[in-house]
Amino acid sequence: MLETLITSKTRIKLILKFFINPENKVHMRGLATEFNESTNAVRVELNRLTKAGLLERVPDGRIKQYQANTKHSLFSDIHNIVIKYMGIDKLIEEVLAKLGDVELALVTGDYARGVDSGIIDLVVVGEIDKDYLQRLIDKAESLVKRKIRSLALTRDEYNQLKENFEVSKALIVWSTENSN
């Protein structure tokens, strides 16, 4: 769908990268390598999105990194479109809302970094019936047309392992604080 609205594949990749997780900060050369695109193609699109105010340059020593401008009036709208495009809204509706006692759910890995690899890594924290979780995931996979890898943890297990999830780079998609 985005390919119909936005003709530049590089621009689509940038929008996904920065608007799925506003914490993503990346240097232009890193983006060129990740996207397997020329630095010039990435620079042109970064300049367009920055000039439009959707991205901002963030100095990091001698290099400039880019990140989403969360203060832009269209930020939340674009973020919601990206969430829907990547299937995370269906993941929340079909899995997390029906699962019961979920304290926290994180999307980690490629999706949290804004890369649509076709595999969603989901960490679910709470008292979870793992068989029921798998049945819900099987249904959700057909809706989002992506593979979902899940890891169900109790709160104690999560506390022991949370450094491994790079929580600062994870995308929190469910939390008991914001679900009520």
Image (spheres, helix red, strand yellow):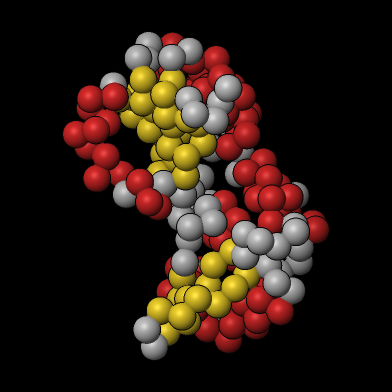
Q: Position of residue 136 (x, y in %)?
A: 51, 18
Residue at (74, 74) in percent of width and height = 52
Residue at image position (51%, 36%) is: 173
Residue 90: give x, y in percent of width and height. 62, 30
Residue furthest to the left: 160
Residue placed most toward the observer, 7 or 58:
58
Which percent across, then down, holds residue 143?
63, 29
Q: Residue furthest right?
A: 5
Residue at 38% of width from left, 33% of height from top? 123
* Residue 16 picture quarter: bottom right
Q: Quarter of the image for the C terminus: give it.
A: top right
The vertical placement of 126 against 22, above or below, is above
Q: Nearer the viewer, residue 33 or 27?
A: 27
Res 140 seen here:
no
Q: Is residue 71 left or right of residue 40?
A: right
Q: Against 18, is 89 above or below?
A: above
- Residue 59 visible at all: yes
Q: Nearer the viewer, residue 104 or 2?
A: 104
